[in-house]
Amino acid sequence: MDFRLTDDQRALRAGVRELLAGRFPRERLRAVVDAGAPAVDRALWRELGGAGFFALRLAEADGGVGLGLPEAVLVFEEAGRALLPGPLVATHLAAGVVAGAAEGRAVVTALDVVGQAAGQAASGSAGPLVEHLASADAVLVIGDDKGGGGGGEGGGGIGVRSAAGLARSARPIRSVDPATSLHRLDRGGRPGRRERWSAAGPAGCRSAARLRREAVLLTAALQLGSAARTVELAVRHAQERSQFGRAIGAFQAVQHLCAGMLVRAETARSVVYAAAVTEDAGEVAAAKLLADEAAVRNARDCLQIHGGMGFTWEADVHLHLKRAWVRAEQWQTAAEAEEELAAGLLAGL
């Protein structure tokens, strides 16, 4: 069995990288970061929608591209590499459910009612966390498949809520990532009555559990892209920075750091790609666990290789670390991934 990327998949990855380099260059990223009040760039969102970013897995008959989850993982890996901000995963999953999401006309954020309820019970205090609520037009509410978890009365699964209505029970919180806006619902707050359920489109015809699993995998793909990018940044700096008359990349300690970063990134890549093919819950959990570790630890090692320069606001390394911290808490934490893996191992005994 050949697991190498096909020519079409390689072309897709190269095309997305070129697209993001032209539509979201470093200058645009820094403008978002330096603005201090992160909001979704509507013009960029429409450009991404027009390029098929959100309709990637929507059927061609419905105006989509008609590709699969492995191709979506490749696209999201490139988005993570470019530190593309915004509720990318939620809007991608909502294509076909929320009107205009596929074309980028609607900005969608997501609320995982079941996952947030479990986290809230464990912490005993904090309410659900919602990303980019202030910029959203709609909120995709993902509950359970048995009813009662979807934020409405007498129904479960997948629902759509008004962002304006949900914002009344939310409060902004300080995000470590300067390009990510976060709100937290009041403790005990509920998403409220459903405004519209949908069984049409790719999200509506999938179970909430599968939709949540796809969200975890696409978030892992974003982490993978960031981990791979910090390897590039570290190696380039090690080649350019000189000390004691030699490039610092000639020193064994720096070489070991770069080698460790590469191993983490490529290990995560193999597991993320495999999970995109199998869609197994345990493999998706392993992908998130390894991708989170690679993104966070690679960013830290990249900071170390850059030395004092890496800690400055002007360098982009700290942005990768802060975004990795935020994504590590989204959809599936390390503890939740470990529990998923443990449950799978026990079930196989």
Image (cartoon, rainbow, N blue to C red):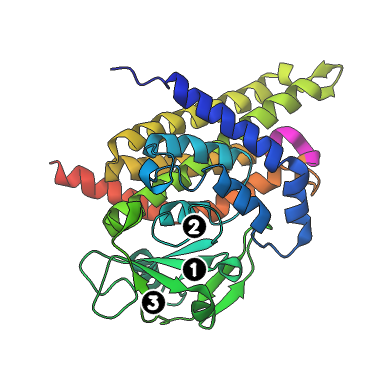
Instruction: Name the disc covering residue 138, or none.
Output: 1
SS at mark 3?
A: loop
Task: Identify the image quadrant of residue 305.
Answer: top right
Amino acid marked by disc 2 = Ala
SS at mark 1?
A: strand
Instruction: Name the disc covering residue 101, or none.
Output: 2
Question: How far apart are the alpha carbons under marks 2 and 1?
Answer: 9 Å
| Circle 2 Cα neighbour tier, 10 Å, few/some/many (<14 / 14–19 / ≥20) | many
Against 126, is 110 above or below?
A: above
Q: Earlier in the sequence, mark 2 or mark 3?
A: 2
From where the camera sits, is residue 245 visible? yes
Quadrant housing the C terminus: top left
Are the residues tagged 2 and 1 within 8 Å (C-beta)? yes
- Where does the magenta region start and end? 303-309
Magenta region includes residue 135 = no
Q: Residue at x 68, y 25 (%)?
A: 235
Against 73, is 232 above or below?
A: above
Question: How far apart are the alpha carbons under marks 1 and 3?
Answer: 10 Å
Amino acid marked by disc 3 = Glu
| Circle 1 Cα neighbour tier, 10 Å, few/some/many (<14 / 14–19 / ≥20) | many
Q: Which residue is mark 3?
A: 195
Relative side of 209 to 263, left or right: left
Task: Please identify the dominant SS of the magenta region.
Answer: helix
Magenta region includes residue 307 = yes
Of labels 2 and 1, the one closer to you: 2
